[in-house]
Amino acid sequence: MRRFVTAAVLAAALPVASAQAWEPTKPIEIIVPFPPGGSSDQMARTIQGAIQKNNLVSQPIIIVNKPAAAGGEAMLDIQKSAGDPHKLITTSSGIYMTPLATKLPVSWKNFTPIAMMAQDAFLLWVNASQPYKNAKDFVEAAKKANPPLKTGGNGSKREDHLISVTMEQAAGIKITYIPYQGGGPSSVQLAGGHIDANMNNPAEEIANWRSGAVKPLCVFSDKPLAYNQKITADMSWADVPTCVSQGLDVNYQMLRGMFMPGKVTPEQQAFYVELFRKVTETADWKAYVERNALVPDFRSGQAFVDFLTTDEQKHKDLMGKAGFIGTN
């Protein structure tokens, strides 16, 4: 375990010249632990396009989707590929949540951390026809509802479900959570009035917000999003208040990061750290981040390892309180 964390720290200290001492000699495979079309898949394909368009590497980039077992298949693939510097995985908070919920014998500590590319915010969304003006209105309605209000999201014991249960605990309310096969189906159900709310990220709801079918009540972040361009006639992402400021004490953001298998060399790791740093400087990546209202947050080396350590513990605590930790 310590050798991978140490490698991450050493790679961050390597000069650029050393980072260029090794280069890929065959196609680079980026594994996405989710189905095609989802937000993680979109990020991987944006990275693929930015690398190829800007000639950042000489080898082609291949995207491979392995969504089975809530991303567990992809994580086990990377674990079994120790020493292979031509294979990467892009992942979210599922890198902790899937092993914790399923007792899958794999951990991010078995991998080589490369970089956190950004963080993804989640918002409390409701159908636009509902009278709720803020999170307080929703909580008051949930307290009175019989049967309980229904929320939906991207699968059982995933980020959306965790936020829903954390909302129940923070506000003293009861909510019925309905798992779907992704944020897209959850968005469709909310727009159709079949559920009362969801906790989607910006990319999954922007189309229905722009069309007037749904509206955001608050964002589960410690500060509002930074994007001021209007999405509707009178609101931008920056105009959405935080849930905490609305009296709903829930704060959650999801990492979007890149990892290699374990047992790669510091030079190989440093090559990809520099590659993804360059990706974040491209116009393609910047446009993708703004379009999806991501929180820019590039971290590598010890800063990334520190984040992973703290974020994993946060998920253990939240999942423990929610009853999501798997048993043998």
Image (cartoon, rainbow, N blue to C red):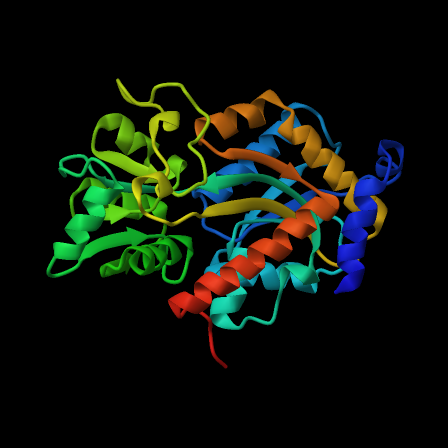
Residue beneath the point at 56% across and 61% down: 313
Q: Nearer the viewer, residue 193 or 46?
A: 193
Q: Position of residue 97 (x, y in %)?
A: 50, 61
Q: Is residue 86 left or right of residue 324?
A: right
Q: Position of residue 248 (x, y in %)?
A: 32, 47
Q: Is residue 189 visible?
A: no
Count how many numbered circles sit on residues in the image. Answer: 0
Residue beneath the point at 12% across and 55% down: 144
Q: Is residue 61 left or right of residue 315?
A: right
Q: Position of residue 120 (x, y in %)?
A: 48, 41
Residue 73's place in the image compared with 163, above or below, is below
Residue beneath the point at 79% across and 39% down: 271
Residue beneath the point at 80% across and 61% down: 3
Residue 285's place in the image compared with 105, above or below, is above
Indicate the quadrant where residue 74 lies.
bottom right
Q: Is residue 103 left or right of residue 128?
A: right
Assign the N terminus to one quadrant of the image.
Answer: bottom right
Q: Is residue 218 left or right of residue 50?
A: left
